[in-house]
Amino acid sequence: MNKIIFILAAVLILVSCSQKKETVIKSELEIKMDKIAEDYVKLVLNIGQYDTDFVDAYYGPKEWRANLKSNLKFDSTAYKYLSTKTNELLNSLESLAEYRADELETLRFRYLYKQLLACKTKIFMLNGIILPFEEETKALYDSSAPTYSDEFFQSAIKELDKILPGKDDVAKRLNDFKMKFVIPAYKLQDVFNVAIKECRTRTLEHIKLPKEESFAVEYVKNKPWGAYNWYKGNFYSVIQVNTDLPIYIDRAIDLAAHEGYPGHHVYNALLESNLVDKRGWKEFTVYALFSPQSLIAEGTANYGIDVAFPGDERIKFEKEVLFPLAGLNPNEADLYYKVLEVQKQFSYAGNTAAKNFLDGKWTRKQTVGWLQKNALRTKESAEKYVSFIEKYRSYVINYNLGMDLVKDYIERSGGADDHPAKRWELFEKLLSTPQTPSGLQRKE
């Protein structure tokens, strides 16, 4: 018996040594990448001391953040230190370019490189350098948004003029018509809960999520955004919904899908599960808001609405379930969604407004007026949107351009309307792997 035990022990030792040796050989590149990733996380946290919005989420080692402060004044010492550190990390990454890597490691390399370039840009901006809008979007979000003329938006307004009931000014008619579809405040929570449940059910039919995933919903006021997902780690989010402005019935699915399933909550949970827990990639324990990651996050969150509700499935669900629950008349629902479809042409109006405002061509008052005229926003809504631009600057491109890039990538890769299973497969891949906007763009 002792002889058998000795032999088994010897075999186990040999296997263990063999595994260790194999791991060292296999992970030589990854060990170096892991060190860069760790330093990247610490760099992002350091930058966050000077801009509290920069670190959108962090669930890495507590000691990495323990001695850091917030709202520090940015000075020449901070600029020199952060710039030097960023350059060192970029140089370290470039030194690894000669290594052969698999697809996922290549994506990781590209992701870290683009994120570090965004950090470098943010450090410049903290030091007082103001980039033109288009240069800022390219540097921070790895993409440039298209621009449209006033005539493009006025063409959409003419379409609305034809289909909206009444004879008053088209902006007034649009507002009056849409007010019929506002969710009463006392029904808001019930409607959102049902919308969330439906979005979750549809998502789980195609994507396996960690069993312990969950989120809480809070209703808040006095925010520049409509809703926000605060990811806390351990597959848990806090989703806040801003109730400053009227919330229309279509926003229930929009926000439930965008912020929850299969949007931000699923995106963060899959990154944590697949890349942090399974691979130990610490760079995904931090989310730098002003970076290419945001274009991927917002783009997938917006496109995820259509993935979860293809074709007319959304309208059908809302008419049959959400409209009655909210106490709204579904008889005009078809016209309502026709109006919303035309309004989608206003999507890039926010980019135009942000570009001219941030580049100093328009005053705040002019920007508000332009949004009222060319996107038919109410004054209150336009004011709120400009407040968003003032706080988050060129971030506005992430919603529309992000969705268009994700949609184009998935559809040209085989995930068109007539291949829903393939669409979900490609969508899940984008949610659970390191991606960059330029990596999704069509190669000419």
Image (cartoon, rainbow, N blue to C red):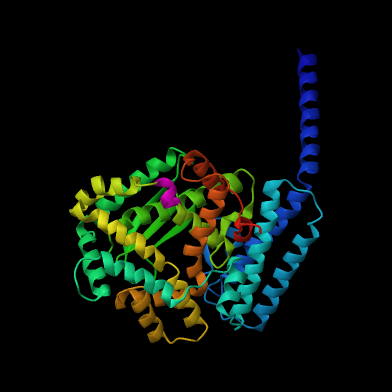
Q: Indicate the quadrant containing the N terminus: top left, top right, bottom left or bottom right.
A: top right
- Please count the marks in the image: 0
Q: Is residue 91 left or right of residue 265?
A: right
User: Which residue is painted at 60% across and 56% down in the image?
Assistant: 440
Q: Is residue 9 left or right of residue 368?
A: right
In the displayed structure, 276 sits above or below 10; it is below
In the displayed structure, 62 sits above or below 53; it is above
Q: Position of residue 352 (x, y in %)?
A: 47, 75
Front in this rendered view, residue 109 or 304: 304
Q: Quadrant of residue 373?
A: bottom left
User: Which residue is painted at 30% across and 67% down in the image?
Assistant: 160
User: Which residue is painted at 70% across and 53% down in the image?
Assistant: 34
Query: Is residue 313 located in the magenta-colored stretch of the structure?
Result: no
User: Which residue is painted at 27% across and 67% down in the image?
Assistant: 162
Query: Is residue 308 located in the magenta-colored stretch of the structure?
Result: yes
Question: Is residue 75 visible in the rendered structure shown here?
Answer: yes
Q: Quadrant of residue 153?
A: bottom left
Q: Position of residue 229 (x, y in %)?
A: 43, 58
In the displayed structure, 16 sits above or below 259; it is above
Magenta span: helix, strand or loop, mainly?
A: helix
Front in this rendered view, residue 10 or 125: 125
Q: Indicate the quadrant containing the C terminus: top left, top right, bottom left or bottom right.
A: bottom right
Question: Is residue 58 visible in the rendered structure shown here?
Answer: no
Q: Which residues are magenta?
A: 304-310
Q: Position of residue 223 (x, y in %)?
A: 37, 70
